[in-house]
Image (tube, grey):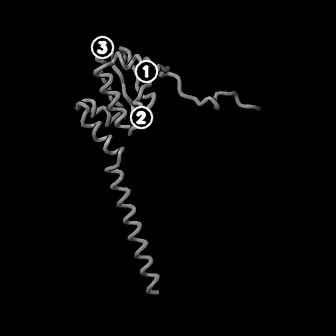
Amino acid sequence: MFLFGRNVAQGARLRALRALYRSFNEQNGPEARARRLLREWLSPEQRAQFDVNGFFEVTGSLTGRRYRIHQGTMSNVLELDEKLEPKVGWCFLPERALAVGDVMLAQKIALETDEAAVLAIAKSFSPRLPFVPRAMRRAPQI
């Protein structure tokens, strides 16, 4: 009976240690650090917009167009029209894989400092059409 009690206590300690590790990693892992860095670079208005909506808006350095950067790494930048409605979607990202916050920060800096170079390499897409995987586009067989 005594050995059983000790194993239960060891199991509880192990679960607590795993929970502590998960908590530490969530607060200090690459995604959390990238998100903190992004928030530091956002203006107070952008930060508030990001907290409420999950996106923030930037102004292009060359044309003065407004862009909305949504949380994500691909196809997450939308060019806005005069009514702040999505007009064109733009897909551009760093050459290597980065945390989501780092990609969004790179997109923000690129649009605000060298909009022309960004648009020269970016791929456009329609922001109004939902993405449907190719396998799902076929009509169902009856």
Q: Is residue 120 above or below residue 7?
A: above
Q: Nearer the viewer, mark 1 or mark 2?
A: 2
User: Which badge, 2 or 3, comes first in the chain's sequence?
Assistant: 3
User: Which badge, 1 or 2, comes first in the chain's sequence?
Assistant: 2
Three-letter amino acid code at the position of disc 3:
Leu
The residue that label 3 is drawn on is 62
Camera-side residue: 36 or 56?
Answer: 36
Residue shown at the point (39%, 17%) measured from the top left: 119
Residue 49 position within the rendered picture, expressed as x and y whole percent measured from the top left: 30, 31
The residue that label 1 is drawn on is 122
Quadrant of the rendered image containing residue 9? bottom left
User: Which badge, 1 or 3, comes first in the chain's sequence?
Assistant: 3
Identify the mark at residue 96; answer none if there is no mark: 2
Image quarter hosting the C terminus:
top right
Three-letter amino acid code at the position of disc 2:
Arg
* Residue 61 relative to residue 75: left or right: left
Badge 3 crowding class, 10 Å Cα cut-off, few under 14, some 14 to 19, many 20 or more, is few
Residue 75 position within the rendered picture, expressed as x and y whole percent measured from the top left: 45, 27
Q: In this view, does 9 lie above or below 22?
A: below
Residue shown at the point (37%, 66%) measured from the top left: 16
